[in-house]
Structure formats: C-alpha cells, structure tokens
Image: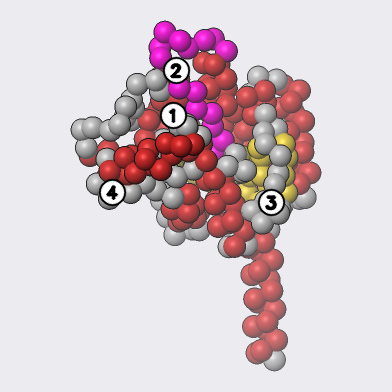
Amino acid sequence: MLGKLKENLIINMSKKIKNQCVVITGSEGSIGQAISVKLINHGYTVIGLDIKDKHSESHTEKFIKVDLGKFANSSTISRNLIEEIQDLLDGNDLSLLINNAAVQITEKTEEISIESWNSTLSTNLSAPFFLTQKLLPFFSPTNGSVINISSIHARLTKPRFVSYATSKAAISGMTKAMAVDLGSKLRINAIEPAAIETSMLKESVSPENVDDFISRLASFHPQNRIGSPNEIANLVYSLTNGDLRFVHGACISIDGGISNRLHDPA
C-alpha cells in the first residue's frame, strides 16, 4: 500500500513539473539551446520562439517561427503570436519567460542608420517588454517569472557598440522598473553575461581568425577563459527552481571577473 502511494506521489509530482511551461525567445541560438535543454531535462515544457527555422527536437518541444522585431511594431503580429502561445500552453499556466533573442549590429556612431537603430531597439528592448506585457494574464499566479538576458554592455562597453549597449542598458533598467511596478505579481530578473562562446560571437570575426580572437578575448578575463552557454543555462535554472525566490529586480553579472579590469579588446 505504501509502495503504491509512493508511486502515485512520484507520478503526480512528475505531472506537476511537466506542466511548468516556459517560453524562450532566440531558442535556436547557442544560449537559447543550452537553456532549453537544461529546462527540458528538469521537466519543463519549452515553447521556443526564433526567427530561424527549428533544427532540433532535442531542445524545443514546441516552436513558433517569428520575427520579434516585427512583433514589437505590429498589433496584428502581436495578437497572432500571443494566440499561438496560448494554444501551445494548452490550458497550463506559464511559469517562465526568458527574453533571450537579440541582434547585435556593430557600427560607429556616424554610421548608425535609422533602420539599424530601430531594428536593434525593437528586437532587444521593445519585444521583451511587449511579450512580457501581453503574456501577463497567462503567468502562474504563484510561480511566474521572467528572466531577461541582458549583457555586460549594459554597464561597460567598447567602440562600435552604441546601439547594442543602449538596448542592453535599457533592458537592465526596464527589469528593475518592472520589478517595482509589478511587485508580487511576477518575479523579474536580468542576467548580464560577458563574452560567451556562441555562434553570434564567432560570426563577428572572419572564420580564419576565430581561434586567435577567442584566445585573445579569454586573456582579458581574470579567469583566462570566456563563458559557455551551459553556464548561462545553469544560472537561469538557479533563478527558476524556487530556491532564490527573494531575488527580484536583480541584474546579475556573470563575467569571469572582466568587469573588475580596466581594459578589454576594442
């Protein structure tokens, strides 16, 4: 009898965990994939959003292809996306939204066009705000959480990063303001990584120079290395699993100590 009760308890707990749904933007990127796999392995149902086509079943169970820049500027696209997400939630509450998608356009101040500026701000700032706003009715009333993937560029930057740094400073500031405004309705935090070994980072230099670039970049970090997507995923899970519920409105650095140094490769 006790064995049967224990078995039922395990099944019920498993169902309860499985019904924890998460929406992850930029799910097809290096960090998005790592976060997805981490959460799936802990029983979450992942709904991935990306402008790219889905290319693996291992890290996203449900998927919507969407241009978040357009979502942020169109009431029709916005309404359609929220309806799609609602359908995929299938009656379950939303436990977690991870605003991870971003574009990084590097230009000098004199070169920045209206189009590239608006593209950066739409994807990196406006989309996370409006996605959070539109999904508020679907969050778990007791367990809702948002994690914004910001950047070290919110605090420290370098040449040619004006648009990107502005968007990340704004999303970190938005995180703090929304935490105050939403109070106990929804827990919201941001993560500010330094260099992480992602496809976006590697694509920022020519293929023949990737190894030298990463090695030089690593040398500027006190740990003499750059971070991995899995380390971001581990931090996301730590903020999500219930042990750190008092963390609210925080912008957490994960930077290998580089923010304590006075130089960085330009």
Can you give x and y, in whole percent of width and height, for residue 104 in the image? 50, 27
Q: Secondary structure at mark 1?
A: helix
Q: Identify the residue shown where x is 70% and y is 44%.
A: 54
Can you give x and y, in whole percent of width and height, for residue 229 in the image? 48, 49
Q: Secondary structure at mark 2?
A: loop
Q: Which residues are drawn in magenta? A: 93-115
Can you identify the residue that label 2 sits on? 107
Pick the residue in front: 60 or 106. 106
Q: Identify the residue shown where x is 67% and y is 36%.
A: 52
Can you identify the residue that label 1 sits on? 168
Can you identify the residue that label 3 sits on? 56
Q: What is the distance, in whole Å, between disc 2 and disc 3 at their CAs?
A: 33 Å
Sooner in the amino-acid sequence: mark 2 or mark 1: 2
> In the image as oriented, which residue stretches furthest toward the front?
208
Q: Quadrant of the N terminus?
A: bottom right
Looking at the rendered image, the disc whose residue lies closer to the viewer, 4 or 1, is 4
Can you give x and y, in whole percent of width and height, for residue 215 in the image? 34, 44
Q: What is the distance, in whole Å, between disc 4 and disc 3 at their CAs?
A: 32 Å
Q: What is the quadrant of residue 43 in the picture? A: bottom right
Can you identify the residue that label 4 sits on? 224
Label 2 neighbourhood size at 10 Å, few (<14), some (14-19), many (20+)? some
